[in-house]
Image (cartoon, rainbow, N blue to C red):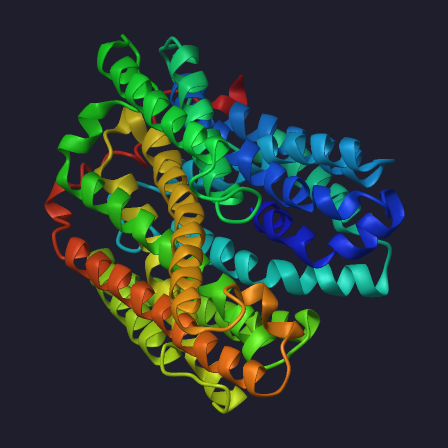
Amino acid sequence: MLLAVLDQNIVSAATVPIVRELDPLHGIDRIPWLVSAFSLAATAALPLYGKLCDSLGAKRVFLGAVATFLLGSALCGAAQDMDQLIAFRAVQGLGGGGLMSVTMVVIAQLRGPGKRGAGKGAGLGGLVAGAGMALGPVVGGLLAEHADWRWIFYVNLPIGLVVLVVSAFVLDLPRHGERRRIDFLGAALAAAFSTALLLVTEWGGREHPWGSPVILGLGGGAVALLALFLWRQATAAEPLLPLSMFRIRTLRAAFAVQGLVGVALTGSLVYVMIYLQLARGIDPASASLFMIPVALGIAGSGLLTGRLSARGWSEKSSVVSGSACAAVATLLLSTNGADTGLWTVRAELLLLGAGFGQTLGQLIVLVQQAAPRHQLGVATTGIRFFQTLGSSLGVAFFGTVLARVYADHGPGGSTSAIPALKGAAHAQALDAFGSSIAAVFVCSTAVLALAVLLALRIRAGDATGQPGEPAAGSESSE
């Protein structure tokens, strides 16, 4: 799971050496596709992975995801041009999407039902996801600087092969006695909707203006595809994402909170990096090191939360306190200026990570406890799906806020003009940028405050207590 999350974020720090070798003339224009191909494929496949787990069993799906991820990694390392690398990144993303979600289903089925602290494994999985997101650019930068960029992908192979072989022989999971039909039409609609939505957030305001025919067409297509997907889920005999799950209060609230956490987490990390580079003049490689306090905060608070859960501290309490802690951190980040001490910034990022570390894994646990046993896979991949969509929407939303506030107060009309400005104009631009980035973090605080209110509505009594219950037989015997 760590490898999958790292690979989702690792390429952003190695784009320069990749472009220099594969396409020095036109490769820079292909970078957005190189970065987003993994995320697009991973997100599009998430709903299908959940249904496959519930129908075929988590072990088979897990092994298939690992194999696909390794195939994509090997092909990426051997790519000879940008077109090949982009295509192979999509293959790697198909496998990576399974590793980031099916792993949580495996953990849920490995643990025994009804045990205090049974969610510790899922909590650690949430930590790995958050830490990998923060450390991806750091690891990518180190590998690109001290080794060939192809090792970003090749390093997955020996570790992944060990995982594949050991899991094939050792992993012992419940076997599903009843095969269910797969709603492939629903899967296609979900993939098309998520791809259209992610392209809107990737291209809007950067590749194309928000009011351009391309963005408006993609946005309208996303709305239409979502409507078709909901209609399909309401009428299909075996829906991919059963709408009945949303009648369970805990699932409904947890999906919403996870989406809001995705908005705030990814948006905050992206715009902290922009603040450090534009307002403080820190180079990208050095700025990526500021993500280490975030990763430490996520890991430290997550481990502490796991221990507290084993002693009676509820998952709901962790989600509420974590969201509130992250809200305080983003509020503090909104007060930073051009002269704020860098150790103060690091402390704020540590607090931010500590907040998110309490929420990421515990939301997964709440969903797995509340989901009916036969829908465990769908519910687990569903929460990852909402986080991914929230992350993309957060970056786009905060980018719009930043651009609008700066356009009202800053010279040049766009933040991209700041490096070229001199003298008084440059000082005025930095002041306007400070106000713009503060508005971004105030919005992030408001998003997290809403997450706190929704988390308070979670009812532990909705939990079925069934997901971890083993069925007769085991997949390993197959």
Coordinates of residue 375 in the picture (x, y in percent): 30, 26
Nearer-the-camera pick, 457 or 438 = 438
Query: Looking at the picture, does residue 275 appear above or below residue 258?
Result: below
Q: Residue at x 11, y 45 (%)?
A: 461
Nearer-the-camera pick, 413 or 366 = 413
Q: Residue at x 44, y 12 (%)?
A: 184
Q: Residue at x 18, y 36 (%)?
A: 464
Nearer-the-camera pick, 117 or 24 = 24
Is 335 left or right of 7, judged from the image as shown? left
Is 247 left or right of 153, judged from the image as shown? left
Q: Residue at x 55, y 79 (%)?
A: 279
Query: Is residue 153 at least partly visible in the picture?
Result: yes
Coordinates of residue 156 in the picture (x, y in percent): 72, 45
Q: How many dots with numbers?
A: 0
Coordinates of residue 212 in the picture (x, y in percent): 47, 37
Is 317 left or right of 147, judged from the image as shown? left
The image quadrant of residue 283 is bottom right
Nearer-the-camera pick, 279 or 157 = 279
Query: Is residue 173 at least partly visible in the picture?
Result: no
Query: Looking at the picture, does residue 3 appear above or below residue 136?
Result: above
Coordinates of residue 371 in the picture (x, y in percent): 24, 34
